[in-house]
Image (cartoon, grey):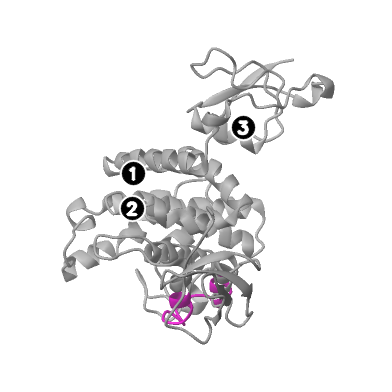
């Protein structure tokens, strides 16, 4: 059977490896006749393998000859954090290329985000930890990758198919690519911006649009979403001050993801905040700016707390979720661990859930 070499961004699950694959290792990390799964895509990404040999028609391989086991030692199978850090580093390199005048390479964008996307769509709770990975120095690169992932999770929750969800993720990843055209002196300024400097920041969606408008693989609806991701339904956004009917749902998905990650992260001028507190702020303080369907989808994701979930409250007490009120999903009934007291967060709004405890 004929062998072809396929770049990782174009590789499809279900293809069959036609040769043993090594990665500076004594033994193959993946054997010949292995059927490619999503796990293998993550392994290729972790080992920086750019293309792999597959049979031109994998259907000719007999089932009994197929070896499906991944033989990578457990300690080197990539965790989400490892893949995420790699993606941020790759995105940073691309961003530096854009600063130098390079064009956006959509294949590289897909390669950066797809391995993470598979993991996040499988386990949405990963988005709760994205703010923990960010840091003020490299915030912009973390923000672009995280916005892509949160956008995809919202799109999935809203019922969009896999193809559209991937497109939304790429749109989220590239929404701020135009910041590469804003002078670093303005972009990285730690003190208050002048009016002229704000005007330049407000132009970045325009710059982003011009950088992606000729990408044939990216849908026109996503290019529009990139241009509009800082517009707000009440007309308070930029760059055009558009209102409800003129702003796309995809733009709103990226907008909500963008704001959610930005508000939960530590910045030079602000400490990080609880996902639960931030989603309440978006729903209440920012009411009227965002599509309520999109906000509700994010609330459902953030507040999807099974009975028995252990949480930490803003006063550092731990407790167990006893009941979730559908009218106030971010404020369930909590049984406090030390006193056994039942604490109703919907009636004690001074307190809120600061984080979910997952490592007991």
Magenta run includes residue 329: no
Which structural element holds mark 3? helix
Residue underneath mark 2? 140
Whole-percent x and y of residue 225? 48, 62
Residue underneath mark 1? 95
Q: Which residue sits furthest front?
A: 339
| Quarter containing the C terminus | bottom right
Whole-percent x and y of residue 98? 32, 43
Q: Nearer the viewer, residue 334 or 86?
A: 334
Q: Are marks 2 and 1 in contact (CB under 8 Å)?
A: yes
Q: Is residue 261 above or below residue 3?
A: below
Q: Nearer the viewer, residue 323 or 360?
A: 360
Q: Is residue 323 left or right of residue 279?
A: right
The mark found on residue 40 in the picture is 3
Which structural element holds mark 1? helix
**Residue 141 visible to an observer of this rendering:** yes
């Amino acid at each position: 059977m004929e062998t072809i070499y396929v770049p990782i961004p174009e590789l499809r699950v279900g293809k069959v490896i036609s040769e043993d694959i090594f990665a500076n290792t004594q033994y193959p990390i993946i054997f010949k006749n292995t059927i490619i799964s999503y796990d293998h895509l993550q392994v290729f990404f972790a080992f920086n393998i750019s293309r792999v040999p597959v049979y031109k028609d994998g259907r000719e391989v007999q089932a009994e000859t197929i070896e499906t086991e991944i033989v990578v030692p457990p300690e080197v199978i990539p965790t989400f954090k490892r893949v995420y850090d790699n993606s941020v580093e790759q995105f940073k390199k691309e961003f530096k290329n854009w600063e130098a005048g390079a064009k956006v390479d959509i294949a590289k964008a897909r390669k950066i985000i797809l391995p993470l996307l598979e993991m996040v769509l499988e386990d949405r709770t990963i988005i709760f930890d994205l703010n923990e990975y960010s840091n003020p120095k490299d915030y912009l690169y973390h923000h672009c990758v995280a916005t892509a992932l949160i956008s995809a999770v919202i799109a999935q929750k809203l019922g969009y198919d896999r193809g559209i969800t991937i497109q939304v993720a790429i749109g989220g990843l590239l929404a701020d690519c135009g910041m590469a055209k804003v002078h670093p002196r303005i972009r990285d300024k730690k003190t208050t911006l002048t009016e002229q400097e704000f005007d330049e920041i407000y132009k970045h969606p325009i710059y982003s649009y011009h950088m992606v408008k000729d990408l044939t693989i990216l849908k026109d609806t996503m290019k529009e979403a990139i241009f509009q991701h800082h517009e707000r339904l009440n007309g308070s956004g930029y760059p055009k001050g558009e209102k409800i009917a003129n702003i796309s749902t995809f733009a709103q998905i990226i907008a909500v993801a963008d704001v959610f990650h930005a508000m939960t992260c530590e910045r030079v001028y602000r400490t990080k905040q609880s996902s639960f507190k931030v989603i309440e702020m978006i729903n209440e303080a920012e009411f009227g700016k965002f599509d309520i369907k999109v906000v509700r989808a994010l609330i459902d994701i953030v507040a999807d707390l099974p009975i028995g979930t252990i949480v930490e409250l803003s006063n550092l007490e731990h407790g167990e979720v006893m009941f979730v009120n559908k009218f106030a999903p971010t404020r369930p009934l909590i049984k406090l661990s030390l006193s056994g007291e039942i604490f109703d967060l919907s009636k004690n709004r001074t307190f809120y859930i600061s984080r979910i405890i997952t490592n007991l």
